[in-house]
Amino acid sequence: MIKKSLKLVLLFSSFLFVGWGNVGHYKISSNATNFFHPQMSDFLFWKDYLCAHASDADYRKGDDPTEGAKHYIDIDNYSSFVNYGRIANTLDSVIALYGSSFVYEQGVLPWATITTIDSMTAAFARRDFDKAMFFAADIGHYVGDGHMPLHITRNYNGQFTNQYGVHSRYESTMIGKYSSQIAYSGDSVHYISNSTAYIFEYLYDNYRYVDSILIADKAAKAFAGSTSSDLFYQKFWEYSNKFTNILFQNASKAMAELIYSSWVNAGSPELYPSAVEDETLIFDYSLSQNYPNPFNPTTTIKYSIPNKDNVNVKIVVYDIVGNEVATLVNEEKSAGNYEVNFNASSLSSGIYIYQLQSGGFLTSKKMTLLK
């Protein structure tokens, strides 16, 4: 618990500076729209919002005790990563292997990114573009943190290499001084068929720059004689600017690719459709992704019943091992769009399954409770 408290204090204090927590995240989000796929050209006006809200996830840390763990993962505390260079991709899998306390102690950055993408996809699917834009801003922040190597290592502040303070020196002070020299070049974006695998791959790729940052910090200190002078930061930038430019460009591109892929997965809904659909005609059952997701302790689930005679509808929530924990709906419903709220205040953090059953129709989705 001491280590977790120190980590949260560090992350809370670092976003008060003007590095990745403000200027850096602004720069990542600002340039992400330059990578937007041509099919999403109508969404380019999102740029101002994404920039203005690029650090909202940081600002929530003071009010939401679950937020801090979403911004990092000490991936090298996992024995499977040390031995094999990777870990299980799903949150329930790593919890089964290592236990919930251990997993949340190390941070849940990749799974927070994944669940926010799920929420954004659900918002796109119901054409709630304002909510999709809200989640897109959070995606940009979590992707940015996933491209800051010191957010993915146990040695996040140089405490194991006698370099205490390197975290803020790199992501805050140095980036604040030299962000204008971070250059972008054009690149094409692609549809990501497996967002989970994609997120873990960039975490693995970015982890290799941990040592690069530490080496640059040591070399700059050796040259300047301290870590506080302008000369130190000049040399720090000189030694690290090449890979720092790569990290920023890759972060903006990843943000754009994940937003684009989410939009495609939602059916590529048009922002300005040429014709208005008759929403009174519902031809099939549907169960939307809950939102917000992750949630604490309440969330909303929307569902649709097709145009037919009244049918019995049942929505049940199960824990990850299949125990029923709540029945949200169990009654006859006529055709229409509905929503139901789920209050999980009595439940513990983890993955839950909610299932819609009506007649011969059965479908389910996952949701994450983070307390």
Image (cartoon, grey):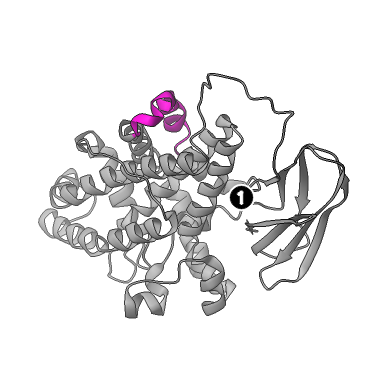
* Residue at the (50%, 61%) spot, across then down: 108
Q: Position of residue 54 (x, y in %)?
A: 44, 37
Does residue 324 lie above or below 229 as drawn? below
Give the residue displayed 63% in from the left and 46% down from the top: 292
Count of number-bearing discs: 1
Secondary element under disc 1, as helix, strand or loop, is loop
- In the depicted view, which residue is nearer to us: 353 or 238? 353
The three-letter amino acid code for the residue at tag 1 is Asn
Q: Is residue 41 magenta?
A: yes
Q: Residue at x 49, y 44 (%)?
A: 265
Asked if residue 226 lies left or right of residue 157, the reply is: left
The location of residue 355, given as percent across then percent down, is 72, 58
- Residue drawn at point x = 22 percent, y = 54 percent: 227
Q: Position of residue 356 (x, y in %)?
A: 74, 54
Badge 1 crowding class, 10 Å Cα cut-off, few under 14, some 14 to 19, many 20 or more, is many
Q: Quadrant of the C terminus?
A: bottom right
Where does label 1 land, which residue? 293
Q: Position of residue 296 (x, y in %)?
A: 68, 52
**Does any portion of residue 165 appear in the rendered image?**
no
In the figure, is residue 165 to the left or right of 285? left
Main SS, magenta region, reads helix
Q: Which residues are magenta?
A: 36-55
- Residue situated in front as seen by the camera: 104 or 63: 104
| Nearest the eye: 87 or 260 | 260
Q: Quadrant of the N terminus?
A: bottom right
Is residue 230 visible in this depiction of the protein?
yes
The answer to if 318 sits in the magenta stretch is no
Left or right: residue 215 versus residue 364 is left
Residue extending furthest toward the top: 274
Closest to the observer, 187 or 310: 310
